[in-house]
Structures are given as structure tokens and as C-alpha cells.
Image: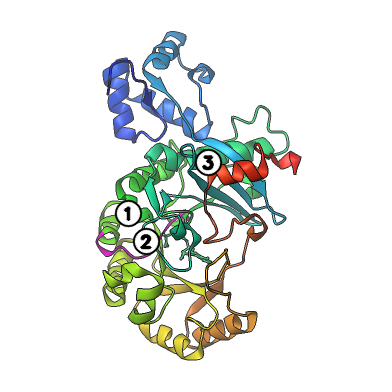
Amino acid sequence: MEAGERVNLLGLPRVELEAFVASRLNAKPFRARQLMKWIYRRGAADFAAMTDLAQDFRAQLGEVARITVPEIVSEQVSNDGTRKWLLRMDAVQGIETVYIPEPDRGTLCISSQVGCAMDCSFCSTAQQGFNRNLSVAEIVGQVWLAHRELAESRPGHGNGRHGNGRHGDARANITNIVFMGMGEPLANFDNVVAAMQLMLDDDAYGLSRRRVTLSTSGLVPALDRLRDTCPVALAVSLHAPTDALRDELVPINKKYPLKELLAACVRYIEKAPRDFVTFEYVMLDEVNDTAAQARQLVKLVQSVPCKINLIPFNPFPHSGYQRSSADAIARFRDSLMQAGLIVTVRKTRGDDIDAACGQLAGQVQDKTRRRGPRLTAAAL
Ligand code: SAH
């Protein structure tokens, strides 16, 4: 660190924050806990607001530290209540974060990279290629911002900076976090794990491991590392019952074919907070949705405790694919269920604002030109 450069406390792992507090501020470790509570639970972005810290300590903090959160470029609210934020990463690139309210929970879908290198043929993020990994602050900053925005939109929010997200209306709370936005989380392993540790930390967001879900295209060695370092709920993007087809849809399959991937899933379950893996399976018309493929899928996953989540394909320009018909999806689901599998069909949420799975793109320039300045819920 250069002299005079202030450290961003957002995203700093607990041990690093404790070390920072001791070495730079000459303070006791409990000050780190206090700071974490202010930053994450109470959503403070400014040391002056931390009223239970002595004034000279706050002044000292302001000299060596900062709390810098990502910038919101725009917000869109879907007819179904889904909210999508575009966050600026640089002059042209952005990432998207989506909040999906349901009667009994609120799920925040976050991004782990700008773009993605996995090159899945049916995903619009793939079309922009890989730009860079997100930092811990940028990953956990998505949760921070969503908390603030949701608190502000809650009735009677006061100044909106102090909603701790745990009480009150379940529909405006974040109860679950899924890494199903842009990017391959296991390809940004260290930052994703550090961010998840803050999501799980009781002095930060205090979520249980079962309520944080990492979704991966199947990076086998990283999956084993995750099992040993920070096991959370796991979703795996399966999408095909054979290597030949999966090679085409999810090219990382050429490196880590199905047999290896499924073996890694079984190893993962040994240490996972849930005793099953969720297999995601995007429904592509006449590509992976036939009766024969349903039978192949049943055979393929028979030795893995799992649930299957069928995702109706969400179209985007020039994808070359079409969504399976409702009939085809129902038939596929029924034949898996008849074989004893647990199957759900993902409800398509937020597609009127391009917030559905695989539709996140994150072009800052396009969006600002098209939609003008930031829209607020009230303006829509
Ligand atoms: N890279 C991670 C997480 C990103 S996407 C992964 O591959 O799992 C989250 C889910 O949305 C994945 O299962 C992904 O395959 C799926 N998805 C991508 N594009 C889609 C589209 N156009 N329609 C429906 N689902 C899509």
C-alpha cells in the first residue's frame, strides 16, 4: 500500500480487519467487530455515522480508511417485483445484481466476474467474453447496495441506512444469496470465498451456509477446494445428459467431463450443508428436451443425491436457441419425477427487464444511453 492510500474496509476479511485495526489504529480487536456491524448490518458508508465510536477514533479512521461501494448506474423494477441494478465497474463495463422477492423469501442473485470465460453457447454473458474478476468489495458490495436499496423502499424506512435486513417484511429482505449472476464464481475462487465468509459471518450478514448457493459450470478442482474451505449450498449447471452434447453447450466439459464432475459432486456432498446438489438444466427446444434425453439424464444422475431444477431458456438476440414448449417441459419433468427424482421448474422472473437467468449483460454505455439516468422505483 502506498503512503496516504486509504484502505477500503468493505470486503476486508475479518482477520485482515482485525490486523488493520491493531496495526494502523492501535485499537483492540473488538473495534473490528464494531466496524463490521456498522458497515454490514447497519449499512454505514461513513465513519461519522458510527456514533458509538469515540470522535477521535472516527477521525483517525477517516485518515487511513474508507468505505467504498460500487456505483449504481440504473435500477429497473419488473412487473413481478423483481429488481435489477446495473453497477458501474468502469467506463463501459457493468455488472448486474437481481433481487427476486417471493412470499416466503427474498433471493439476491449476484455476479462474480465482469463477463465470463466459460463460453456457454446459450448464455448471453458469454457473448461479451471475459473482462475481469470482481474484487471482494465488489462482490459483497452488491449485497450492501441491495440492502440499502431495499431498506429505502420499505415503508417507514427512516433515513434508510439502518435497516439490518433481518426483521420486518420478508418480501423486502435478503434471506438467500445465489451466485447465479454474471461470471463463473469458481474461476474467481479467492475473492468469492472471502465474500462468502462475510455473508456467513454473524457480525456481517449472518446467513446460514444453506442459504448461500454457489452455481458453477463445473470446475472440478475448484469444487474440491470449495468443499474443503467454504462449503455452501451447491448448484451445478448440467444442461445435458451426455458428454457429446455438454461439450457443445458447456465447453468446460471437455476439460472436466460428466463422470469427473459427478464424482466431485458426490465428494462435495460429504461436507456440504445440504445433503443434495441442485442440477440446473436449461430447457432448449429440440436440443436437450426429448424423452430419450430425459431417460439418459435419469441414468446419469442415479448415483448422486440431487434435485433437478429445469430452467426454461430465456432468449436473447442471436442466441440461436428457442425455449422448449410448456408441453415439452412438463413431459420432461414428469418423466424425471416418475423415475423418482425431485424436480422443480424455475419460474421465469423479471424477463420484462432482461433480469432472467442468462440475460444479464451489463453494458454501461448502452444502458445509460437507452434509459437515461438512474430510475428509482418511485419513478416507474
Ligand atoms: N457460471 C455459473 C453461474 C451463472 S448462471 C454457472 O454456470 O452455473 C446461472 C444459471 O443460469 C446457470 O445454470 C446457467 O447455465 C443458466 N443460464 C445461462 N443462460 C441462460 C439462459 N439464456 N436461459 C436460462 N438459463 C440460463
User: Is residue 136 in view?
Assistant: yes
Amino acid under disc 3: Leu
**Relative to 53, is 347 above or below?**
below
**Relative to 365, is 335 above or below?**
below
Q: Nearer the viewer, residue 200 or 142?
A: 142
Circle nearer the N terminus (3, 1): 3
**Relative to 372, is 21 above or below?**
above
Contact, CB < 8 Å: mark 3 with mark 1?
Answer: no
Rendering quarter of residue 169: top right
Relative image position of residue 136 (x, y in whole percent): 38, 40
Outermost residue toward the top?
Answer: 56
Relative image position of residue 91 (x, y in whole percent): 48, 37
Look at 58% across and 60% down and name the residue there. Answer: 356
Residues in magenta, as a range: 211-221
Instruction: Name the mark nearer the viewer: 2 or 1.
Output: 2
Contact, CB < 8 Å: mark 2 with mark 1?
Answer: yes
Query: Quarter holding the C terminus?
Result: top right
Q: Which residue is mark 2?
A: 118
Amino acid under disc 2: Met
Rendering quarter of residue 7: top left
Crowding near the residue tagged with mark 1, few <14, some 14–19, many ≥20 C-alpha atoms within 10 Å = some
Mark 2 residue CB less than 8 A from any atom of ligand 1: yes
Q: Which residue is mark 1?
A: 187
Q: Which residue is mark 3?
A: 87
Label 3: which secondary element? strand
The verdict on residue 138 being magenta is: no
Amino acid under disc 1: Ala
